[in-house]
Amino acid sequence: MRVNSTTNLKIACVIGCENNRDVCKIIHLRVDPEATDDDLLFAGKTIAALQTLPLHSIDRADCCDLTE
């Protein structure tokens, strides 16, 4: 059984390049675990559009405790 579910939205924006790899600033937001992937993608793109930095990626990270 899942308990204590949390979901984080991670929006990575490129701030530079080092050794041929993108260096990113990551915005972490705690969001409703019931949010759909499409909703979070839309929110991530909308927030990224407010930045002057180019978007690198949008990630969803779900976490919960498992109990019997």
Image: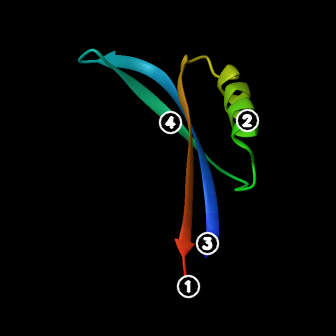
Write the residue at 50% across / 36% down: 26
Say what amino acid the circle numbered 3 marks: Arg
Q: Residue at x 75, y 48 (%)?
A: 35
Q: Which residue is mark 2?
A: 38
Q: Quadrant of residue 18?
A: top left
Q: Position of residue 42 (x, y in %)?
A: 74, 30
Disc 4 target residue: 26
The quadrant holding residue 23 is top left
Q: Secondary structure at mark 3?
A: strand
Mark identifier at residue 2: 3
Using the image, tell me which numbered label, if any, was put on residue 19: none
Determine whether the residue tagged by mark 1 lies in a helix, strand or loop. Answer: loop
Kind of residue indicated by mark 1? Glu
- Mark 1 and mark 2: Cα distance apart in space: 31 Å
Q: Residue at x 62, y 54 (%)?
A: 7
Mark 2 crowd level (few <14, some 14–19, many ≥20, 10 Å Cα):
few
Q: CA distance from mark 4 to mark 1?
A: 35 Å
Determine whether, in the image, residue 43 is placed left or right of residue 66.
Answer: right
Of the residues shown, which amino acid type is indicated by label 4? Ile
Task: Between label 3 and label 4, give the one nearer the viewer.
Answer: 3
